[in-house]
Image: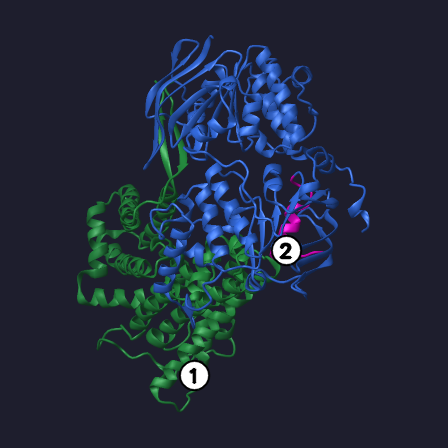
Chain colours: A green, B blue
């Protein structure tokens, strides 16, 4: 028989450079696969990708706009990776982002007579608490009653998104414009601009700071060790004296809180009021980013910047080449699939044998 | 004698390790040939190559004098080679008959003839003493029965060579005897058996010829009648193994350290697995819990380790009740735990070695202070333990999963003993370990005992129980059949108690 057979064998852990090489390969392969779709549309993929990256990086304006979009992506990516490290499958960063935005807006529209530093801090704390509380609910259900986290965190997204819509079309409707949007938050509650006449705000620096803080927590603290132990093998971690339920709850609250900060970034840094389409799916992109970044905070930072380039550049590519901007979503989706396939290769090797 | 299989210059490497280094291995007609070696010596690898599960890097295989290329188990079976693995490959929800004919072409056109298959199966099972109900579903069967199904499955395919990978590891002594009877019938018929094992007793009982592997290389080949256990042990580990560990006599036993009173508990299926277990362990004493596995030992271990709740009864440690305490509290009381399930409970395999060494004490000074783990102390600590307990690992940062079985257990042992426990629960501490590692673990447990530590040793390995224990408690179906002093024990008595005969006399008062 002339058969080729494939077999998966557990491999010894690959060297460190492979971990870095893997996401880069995933990016290249996913772009190659995406080209097929461009070819179907009878467009030159190289031209398309040129405009994609030019539109995301090529000009000062594009670059700054890319940083604006990267800010919530870094935060949701970090949020998801914290939860995933504990093997708590938080698919709910989108809802937690809105929960954070909701509470941050509520604090922001109170017009407290506070110095900007304190008011902004208060708004940030409110966003963290909002996201954290929203994430606590499914985590508690998981820890106490073993309710499936994937299902609850996902469904909680819809509850929060529609709740925000309900509030915005009801009590919070802007009385002047009558649009379903909240009134603007106080001037002294806003995140200041980093670069004049651009939308880049200090939230970007906060997001980068969160990357460092989370890296520190994961690698240097007892909590980080508990999270990694629980995520690696909850049964063993529990046997060895780690309170895995508590760890999962803390990791999920941390995760939700950070996702809530993404909501703060959008409300207090970009729009200055709450709108119902505040996020074009940053929470879901966070999942892809966390995986592409290998759940490593710095990996997540780079993955978020990459996705931000694609999202930002998609408009330019769309206009210049004449294809729908949704190709950016296609690239995201393909990247996730490729990365997941490569993670399989990371743990297993395929042995191929040919018959004679 | 006629050679059925000849394996010549077989070489197989896994990334960095040489599993088989140019090994020559023959199987003759009508013999039991044993592959003897420590864990990781390359025995299973060699047989998986013959069975078509691994591809070799180089070498040649001849079956009945003809050169063959075995690419899959299917090829192996068509050449008359069958293998029974350590972990069975049966479909749980199928019946015995369905499992036996699985993968064979239907006998009547496209229709599967279960009835005639069943008849063949019954005649096979009668002929070789492989008793099993052909209509039973696999999930209803005991481990011993599942193994019989695997053997029938191989025989049904008319194999000439049957490879058994550590078949007795999962069997009771009686079941093992039955298996040996079956094997004797098979060789009488001219079939050949390859027996993989590292238990010298049974190797001497069943083998005609013994081939010894060490670190992937062939170190010896002996006919049974020309060799002794001692010689085999030396060839296997490269030195003389002390068969009996000299045990210091402890003149007076100390205070009762751990007392269990009337423990009751359910197993995972909600069936009562412990029915009133009471015992006490004194300091400087090893209490052995003997019994065929599955008679409540696992549940007892779980309760004492804090990962299962008892439904009735109390546990008292140093005069204080500790019933229902969580793992962390139990650890901090000074109780060391060496669990049966090394891979899923004792270690977090995907974390590096050093983190497994600190996982029970990372929250204590100097390993951490405040919220921070102090990595310089951790490194120092981990390197000291690795050295002190002779853990063979490239570095303390190596992923634990890559270590061999004996070294995994040494990581656990180092972690537990470095906390200077007053009491140790050790469950199947040497299961699956090679002789050298087993001896090491035993020496450490005995020196803990000499230092006044109380030890509860749960083991299916009777040699281990008899070698280490001061007193032996025999469990059967969740009850105590008797507690005996080591010096009063006879093997016959022990065997009777393990199979459910309650001991008269001394210990019947409660």
Q: With respect to residue B70, does B143 lie above or below?
A: below
Given the current orientation, which residue lies at the most extreme bottom position?
A: A113
- Residue B155: x, y in percent? 58, 17
Where residue B325 sits, quadrant-wise, is: bottom right
Distance CA(mark 2)–CA(mark 1): 56 Å
Q: Which residues are magenta?
A: B293-311
- Label annotation for residue B304: 2
The residue lying toward the viewer, choosing from B360 and B233, is B233
For mark 2, name the chain: B
Secondary structure beneath dot 2 equals helix
Q: Nearer the viewer, mark 2 or mark 1?
A: 2
Left or right of residue A90, residue A54 in this image: left
Is residue B80 at all visible to an observer of this figure? yes
For mark 1, name the chain: A
Membership of B298 in magenta stretch? yes
- Residue A192: x, y in percent? 29, 79
The residue under label 1 is A109
The residue lying toward the viewer, choosing from B456 and A202, is B456
The residue lying toward the viewer, choosing from B172 and B267, is B172
Q: Confirm or deny contact between disc 2 and disc 1 (CB under 8 A).
A: no
Q: Which residue shows up at 54% across the image and 49% down it?
A: B445
Membership of A26 in magenta stretch? no
Where residue B246 sits, quadrant-wise, is: top right
Q: Which residue shows up at 67% across the image and 19% down it?
A: B129
Quadrant of the image containing the C terminus of chain A: top left
Q: With respect to residue B257, does B246 lie above or below?
A: above
- Residue B373: x, y in percent? 40, 66
- Label annotation for residue A316: none
Given the current orientation, which residue lies at the most extreme left position?
A: A59
Quadrant of the image containing the N terminus of chain A: top left
Left or right of residue B142, residue B384 in this image: left
């Amino acid at each position: 028989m002339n058969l080729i057979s494939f077999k998966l064998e557990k491999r010894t852990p690959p060297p460190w450079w492979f971990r870095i090489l893997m996401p880069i390969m995933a990016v290249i392969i996913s772009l190659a696969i995406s080209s097929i779709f461009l070819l179907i549309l009878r467009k030159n993929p190289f031209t398309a990708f040129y405009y994609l990256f030019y539109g995301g990086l090529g000009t000062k304006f594009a670059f700054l706009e890319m940083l604006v979009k990267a800010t919530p992506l870094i935060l949701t990516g970090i949020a998801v990776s914290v939860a995933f490290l504990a093997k708590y499958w938080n698919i709910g960063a989108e809802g937690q982002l809105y929960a954070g935005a909701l509470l941050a807006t509520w604090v922001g529209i109170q017009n407290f007579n506070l110095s900007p530093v304190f008011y902004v801090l208060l708004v940030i704390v409110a966003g963290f608490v909002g996201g954290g509380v929203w994430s606590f609910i499914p985590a508690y259900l998981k820890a106490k009653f073993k309710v499936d986290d994937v299902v609850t965190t996902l469904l909680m997204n819809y509850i929060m998104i529609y709740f925000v819509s309900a509030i915005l079309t009801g009590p919070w409707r802007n009385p002047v414009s009558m649009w379903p949007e909240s009134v603007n938050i106080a001037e002294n509650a806003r995140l200041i601009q980093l670069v004049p006449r651009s939308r880049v705000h200090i939230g970007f620096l906060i997001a980068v700071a969160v990357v460092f803080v989370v890296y520190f927590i994961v690698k240097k603290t007892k909590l980080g060790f508990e999270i990694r132990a629980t995520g690696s093998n909850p049964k063993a971690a529990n046997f060895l004296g780690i309170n895995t339920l508590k760890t999962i709850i803390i990791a999920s609250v941390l995760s939700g809180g950070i996702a809530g900060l993404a909501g703060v970034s959008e409300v207090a840094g970009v729009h200055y009021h709450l709108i119902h389409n505040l996020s074009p799916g940053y929470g879901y992109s966070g999942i892809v980013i966390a995986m592409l970044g290998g759940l490593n905070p710095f990996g997540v930072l780079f993955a978020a910047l990459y996705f931000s380039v694609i999202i930002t550049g998609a408009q330019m590519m769309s206009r210049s080449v004449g294809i729908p901007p949704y190709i950016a979503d296609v690239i995201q989706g393909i990247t996730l699939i490729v990365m997941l396939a490569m993670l399989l290769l990371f743990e297993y090797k395929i042995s191929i044998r040919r018959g004679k | 004698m006629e050679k059925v299989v000849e394996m010549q210059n077989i070489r197989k490497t896994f990334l960095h390790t040489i599993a088989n280094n140019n090994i020559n291995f023959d199987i003759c007609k009508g013999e039991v040939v044993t592959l003897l070696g420590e864990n990781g010596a390359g025995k299973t690898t060699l047989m998986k190559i013959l069975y078509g599960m691994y591809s070799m890097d180089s070498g040649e295989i001849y079956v009945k004098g003809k050169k063959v290329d075995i690419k899959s188990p299917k090829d192996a079976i068509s050449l008359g080679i069958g293998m029974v693995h350590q972990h069975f490959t049966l479909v749980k929800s199928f019946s015995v008959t369905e499992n036996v004919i699985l993968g064979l072409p239907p006998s009547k056109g496209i229709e599967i003839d279960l009835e005639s298959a069943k008849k063949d199966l019954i005649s096979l099972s009668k002929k070789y003493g492989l008793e099993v109900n052909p209509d039973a579903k696999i999930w209803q069967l005991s481990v011993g029965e599942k193994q019989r199904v695997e053997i029938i499955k191989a025989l049904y395919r008319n194999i000439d060579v049957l490879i058994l990978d550590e078949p007795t590891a999962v069997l009771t002594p009686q079941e093992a005897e039955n298996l040996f009877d079956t094997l004797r019938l098979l060789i009488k018929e001219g079939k050949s058996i390859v027996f993989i094992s590292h238990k010298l007793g049974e190797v001497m009982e069943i083998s005609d010829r013994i081939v010894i592997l060490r670190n992937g290389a062939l170190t010896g080949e002996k006919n049974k009648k020309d060799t002794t256990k001692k010689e085999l042990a030396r060839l296997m580990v490269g030195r003389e193994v002390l068969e009996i560990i000299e045990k210091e006599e402890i003149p007076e036993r100390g205070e009762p350290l751990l007392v269990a009173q009337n423990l009751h508990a359910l197993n995972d299926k909600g069936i009562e697995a412990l029915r009133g277990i009471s015992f006490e362990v004194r300091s400087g004493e090893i209490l052995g819990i003997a019994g065929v596995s599955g008679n409540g030992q696992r549940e007892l271990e779980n309760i004492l380790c804090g990962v299962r709740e008892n439904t009735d009864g109390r546990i008292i440690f140093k005069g204080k009740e500790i019933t229902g305490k969580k793992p962390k509290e139990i650890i901090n009381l000074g109780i060391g735990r060496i669990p049966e399930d090394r891979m899923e409970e004792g270690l977090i395999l995907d974390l590096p070695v050093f983190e497994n060494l600190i996982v029970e004490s990372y929250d204590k000074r100097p390993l951490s202070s405040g919220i921070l783990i102090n990595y310089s102390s951790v490194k120092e600590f981990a390197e000291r333990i690795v050295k002190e307990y002779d853990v063979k690992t490239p570095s303390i940062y190596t992923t634990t999963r890559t270590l061999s079985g004996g070294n995994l257990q040494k990581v656990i042992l180092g972690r537990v003993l470095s906390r200077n426990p007053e009491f140790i629960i050790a469950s199947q501490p040497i299961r699956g370990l090679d002789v050298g590692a087993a001896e090491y673990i035993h020496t450490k447990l005995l020196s803990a005992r000499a230092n006044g530590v109380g030890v509860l040793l749960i083991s299916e390995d009777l040699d281990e129980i008899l070698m280490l224990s001061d007193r032996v408690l025999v469990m059967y179906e969740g009850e105590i059949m008797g507690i005996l002093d080591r010096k009063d024990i006879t093997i016959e008595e022990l065997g009777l108690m393990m199979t459910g005969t309650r001991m008269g006399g001394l210990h019947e008062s409660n």
